[in-house]
Amino acid sequence: MRKQAQPDLSGNERMVLEIVRRASGGVMRSALAPQTNLTQPSVHRIVDTLLEAGLLKLGEAVVHGRGKPSPALQLNSEAGYTIGISVNTDCVSFGICDLACNIVHEEMLDGKPDNRRDTLFLLKQRTRDAMTARGIDASRLIGVGFSMAGFFVDSARRFNAPEPLRDWSLVDIRSELETLFDLPVLVENNGTTGAIGESAVGAGRRFPTFGYLSFNYGFGGGIVLEGRPLFGAFGNAGEISRVFTAEEGPSRPALGELLKRLNARGVEVANIRELRQRFDPAWPGVDDWVQEITPALNRAIDMLRAVIDPEAIVFGGELPHALGERLLQVSPSKSLTRYGVEAPFPTRLVSEIAGDPAIVGAALIPLMERYFLWSLPKP
């Protein structure tokens, strides 16, 4: 796969692309200027430049006011593509995302990611096959986004991952991927990429500021403030499990701990993937586990409330939807009141992304870095 020369866009060009991205079904030229601090002539010049570059296209003509029907502006979805990779404790998945932020292909590799080298070579082969099948030329690839459970330990973005991913820990995975794909690579933990995916195509479209709880083999999270993900000084913002002591660790809401409880009760579930596919809220041990982790879950929610004051708390990651609905029934912790009045409580909801949210978020990162804005400035 070879790199493609990409245009350097100005901040105003990126702002126009971001407005078009957020508009469902396209946006009229006349509607752009009021959403910016630009004049109408400036917006027209920017639009013409983006049309000439092939990043925007004209959609079908629609009636707008009393004038003649005008074509709406849309993103040219075929102008560029990214690859999003998600490494979980028991599987590796990837997706191909177009410029309009649509996942056009999603696939899970066979087998566990026990051997990093073999998995990476298989990943390259499968992505190449998928692109060929979709008629996507390698020259249109923009970059790769990589997501994995764990926290960063240094500026090289080396992961300290859960035990099942030992072979992926403390290595320069970004350099390995850049050599393998010959493309720019951006890496984030799966809590942050899940939050990014939720912000772009899920609940974040209604709630610009939210906390994201990532239920995986472990338990983590991500933070989005006014549409912009918070990465932190070391890339570990939202690493919520850090607040639990070693003694409290087994009672935090980590799905790996739920697997242990289920297996001890005679419910044979081999891994997190199978848990998500087969989960039954009536299984013995589920209610006991929910009761056990309730204090830790509420502590995580309370910390997000206290620090970022979110509009919503999203339960995401690899959480089975039915289990998420069960966790929504957990009573919040009682907070101190003053004059009998409490602070507003955020909306709690289960992720609205059907597939792996980490794939969506990972694939979006190169697009956001190159073409769009994480959040729009006030006009």
Image: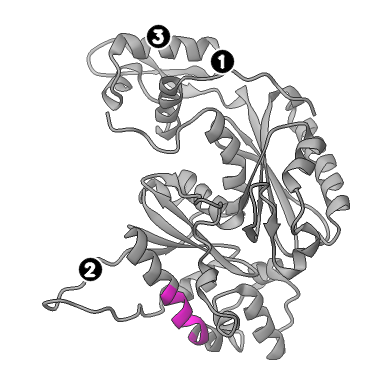
Q: Which residue is mark 2?
A: 343
Q: Is residue 113 left or right of residue 215?
A: right
Q: Position of residue 243 (x, y in %)?
A: 50, 72
Is 311 magenta? The answer is no
Q: How far apart in space, not on screen, are marks 1 and 2 (Cα)?
A: 49 Å
Disc with the residue nearer the chain's start (1 vs 2): 1
User: Which residue is tagged 1?
Assistant: 54
Q: Nearer the viewer, residue 204 or 131?
A: 204
Percent across and percent down for residue 76 are: 55, 23
370 vs 231, nearest the viewer: 231
| Residue 64, position as x, y percentages in the image | 29, 19
Q: Amino acid at mark 3?
A: Arg
Quarter holding the C terminus is: top left
SS majority, magenta: helix
In the displayed structure, 270 sits above or below 42; it is: below
Report the residue that reaches farthest toward the left: 339
Count neighbours of disc 2 (C-alpha within 10 A) and say few if under 14, some if 14 to 19, many if 20 or more.
Answer: few
**What label sits on residue 144 in the rendered view?**
none
Quadrant where the N terminus is found in the figure: top right
Q: What secondary structure is found at the residue carrying circle 1?
A: loop
Q: State how far apart marks 2 and 3 are (Cα).
A: 47 Å
Can residue 203 be seen? no
Amino acid at dot 2: Ala
Left or right of residue 236, residue 164 in this image: right
Specify whether residue 292 is painted magenta. yes
Residue for badge 3: 45
In the image, what residue occupies the spot 54% across and 70% down?
Answer: 241
Q: For numbered disc 2, what is the local secondary structure? A: loop
> How far from the left and from the top, in percent, is residue 115?
86, 58
1 vs 3, front mark: 3
Q: Is residue 139 above or below residue 374?
A: above
Q: Amino acid at mark 1?
A: Gly
